[in-house]
């Protein structure tokens, strides 16, 4: 699938101004107003009607896909230690909200199944980052959830790990793939082709360092979604480059910024 086909299948190619107006992707849900990667953050992002809701997934000690960014629990929960040391049941009792404020006490770490069923019943499109290396067997669990929830046309997967994306290509062919990079390289274009990826997504710093490579990526019919940009200065630079999407912790502010640029004055 080409990037243009990817856009067309989602109805994006027909949007007025879509060739220049970037998609808005909520980073770890709407993490500016609710605990990152929680169902509350997913719900807050959905309320904004963002184009994609990005979340991170890894696996518990018993191999269940769960939604959490870090390899350990220290930063965003009331527990410490590696996520991989606890089973999914044990993780279900961890408080993943009180670090952000007393109003979020009791927020839990969701499973991937819970998030995908939430998207199935309440709407939204998911950008799922697979953290680390996933085997074909582990990706097969995601494939089962995709079939169960009918999420193939409401979901994209991305990863830095090429072995993980290869497993997604083989076990999850119905779901589009993005290749993540800190700093994009010319050789990533061929790597993306081999993996069947439709976009190469650099960090904002990498984008700024390698603007010529970003241009080459787009000239090869691959998309560019830049992470994580939260300031108006960064957004202006990305608009000037006509990137395809912006991954941000501030999707509401970004929507307002884009409305001021693209929406006609009434």
Image (spheres, rainbow, N blue to C red):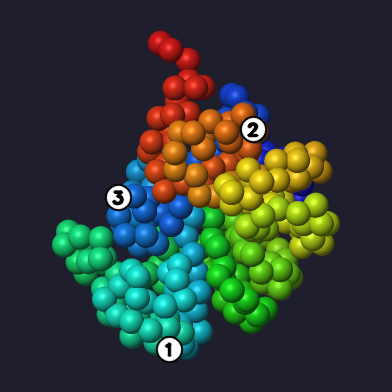
**Residue 33, disc:** 3
**The residue positioned farthest toward the left in the image shown:** 102
The answer to which quarter of the image holds residue 22 is: top right
The residue that appears at 53% across and 31% down in the rendered structure is 236
x, y percentage for residue 19?
Answer: 65, 29
Label 1 sits on residue? 85
- Residue 175 vs 89, above or below: the answer is above
Cα distance in 3D space between marks 1 and 2: 43 Å
Cα distance in 3D space between marks 2 and 3: 28 Å
Instruction: Determine contact: label 1, label 2, CB under 8 Å.
Output: no
The 10 Å Cα crowd at callout 3, few under 14, some 14 to 19, many 20 or more, is some
Of residues 218 and 172, the one nearer the viewer is 218
Label 2 sits on residue? 242
Of residues 234 and 173, the one nearer the viewer is 234
The residue that appears at 38% across and 84% down in the rendered structure is 81
The answer to which quarter of the image holds residue 12 is: top right
Mark closest to the chain's N terminus, 3 or 1: 3
x, y percentage for residue 174?
Answer: 68, 60
Q: Can residue 193 be seen in this view?
A: no
x, y percentage for residue 253?
Answer: 38, 36
x, y percentage for residue 73?
Answer: 37, 77
Mark closest to the chain's N terminus, 2 or 3: 3
């Amino acid at each position: 699938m080409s990037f243009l086909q990817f856009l067309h299948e989602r109805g994006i190619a027909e949007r007025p101004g879509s060739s220049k107006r970037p998609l808005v992707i909520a980073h770890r849900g709407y993490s500016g107003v609710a605990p990152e990667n929680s169902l509350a953050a997913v719900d807050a992002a959905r309320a904004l009607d963002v184009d994609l809701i990005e979340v991170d997934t890894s696996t518990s000690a018993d191999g269940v896909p769960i939604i959490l960014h870090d390899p350990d629990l220290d930063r965003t929960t009331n527990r410490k230690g590696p996520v991989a040391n606890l089973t999914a049941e044990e993780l279900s009792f961890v408080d993943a909200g009180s670090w952000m404020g007393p109003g979020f006490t009791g927020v839990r770490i969701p499973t991937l199944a819970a998030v995908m069923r939430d998207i199935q019943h309440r709407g939204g499109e998911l950008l799922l980052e697979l953290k680390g290396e996933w085997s074909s067997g582990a990706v097969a669990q995601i494939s089962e959830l995709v079939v169960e929830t009918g999420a193939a046309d409401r979901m994209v997967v991305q990863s830095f790990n090429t072995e993980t994306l290869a497993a997604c290509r083989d076990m999850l062919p119905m779901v589009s793939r993005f290749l993540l990079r800190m700093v994009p390289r010319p050789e990533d274009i061929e790597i993306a082709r081999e993996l069947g990826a439709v976009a190469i997504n650099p960090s904002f710093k990498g984008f700024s360092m390698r603007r010529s490579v970003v241009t080459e990526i787009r000239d090869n019919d691959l998309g560019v979604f830049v992470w994580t940009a939260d300031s108006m200065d960064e957004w202006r630079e990305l608009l000037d480059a006509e990137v395809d999407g912006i991954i941000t912790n501030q999707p509401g502010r970004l929507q307002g910024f884009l409305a001021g640029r693209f929406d006609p004055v009434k």
